[in-house]
Amino acid sequence: MKVVTGLRERPRGRVEVDLDGAPWRLVPVEAVVRSGLSVGRALDRETARALGRELRRSEALDAALRALRHRDQSRRRLEQRLERRGTPLEAREDAIEALERTGLVNDPRVAAGRAQALAERGYGDAAIRFALEAEGLAEADVVGALSSLEPEVDRARGLLAARGQTLKTVRWLAGKGFDASSLEDVAGFADGA
């Protein structure tokens, strides 16, 4: 049975592991700590399995963090991304739960931000709801995000003022997910749209 004979710190949070005096692997420091590797410890089956689990967890966490580097993502989107990469279920769940505990994954924040961005691009509540549900966000998060927006009638009124109160604009707003009753309230002729 091989024995850990050296652990040397390397750049970027890595540790070089030596087995029986020879270099073996470069692994994340967190995997070394969580698996309990130490100089003089035998790399038995149990320790090797623990190290393997921690390496998969670390890889899942790194992949999720890379995805979050560009934009906020919902829990479901991160799960799908990690699943497409072939990340085992246990590692996916561990990584995402860790990110939720730190606040890096926060579905209510994702819902509110996405809803605000869509509202600013001229979308109505129905289209925003559809987009948020397609993202896999919970109903409570969707409702909370929609309630934080300026009322749909006011948004429609502003868009009508900016684009001109014509039948073409009303049709455009209907296509952007604005409710017919909201359009009727602000334009007075949504039924003709």
Image: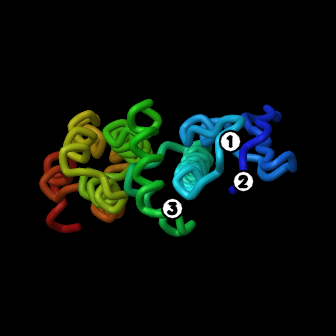
Q: Nearer the viewer, residue 75 or 8?
A: 8
Q: Which mark is residue 2?
A: 2
Return the x and y of residue 139 as percentages of the image width and height: 19, 51
Q: How is the image coloured?
A: rainbow
Q: Which residue is mark 3?
A: 81
Mark 1 and mark 3: span between their CA atoms? 22 Å
Disc 3 secondary structure class? helix
Q: Residue 191, percent across and down?
A: 14, 65
- Which of discs 1 and 3 lies nearer the camera? The answer is 1
Label number found at residue 28: 1
Q: Tell me if 158 is positioned left or right of 51 in this view.
A: left
Cα distance between the residues tagged 3 and 2: 36 Å
Please state which of the two labelled residues, at mark 3 or mark 2, is closer to the viewer.
2
**Mark linked to residue 39:** none
Quadrant assignment for the C terminus: bottom left
Between label 2 and label 1, give the one nearer the viewer. 2
Q: Amino acid at mark 3?
A: Arg
- Would you call the spot at circle 2 few (<14 residues within 10 Å), some (14-19), or many (20 or more)? few
Judged left or right of residue 103, residue 165 is left
User: Which mark is first along the chain, 1 or 2?
Assistant: 2
* Labels 1 and 3 touching (C-beta < 8 A): no
Q: Nearer the viewer, residue 167 or 148?
A: 148
Amino acid type, residue under disc 2 in the picture: Lys
Q: Secondary structure at mark 2?
A: loop
Quadrant (top left/top right/bottom left/bottom right) for the N terminus: bottom right
> In the picture, residue 152 is in which quadrant?
top left
- In contact (CB < 8 Å): disc 3 and disc 2: no
**Structural crowding at the residue carrying mark 3, measured as other residues with C-alpha within 10 Å and reported as few (<14), some (14–19) or many (≥20):** some
Does residue 67 appear anywhere in the picture? no
For image coordinates 32% across by 65% down, the residue present is: 175
Q: What kind of residue is marked 1?
A: Pro
Which residue is pictured at 43% across the width and 58% down the height? 79
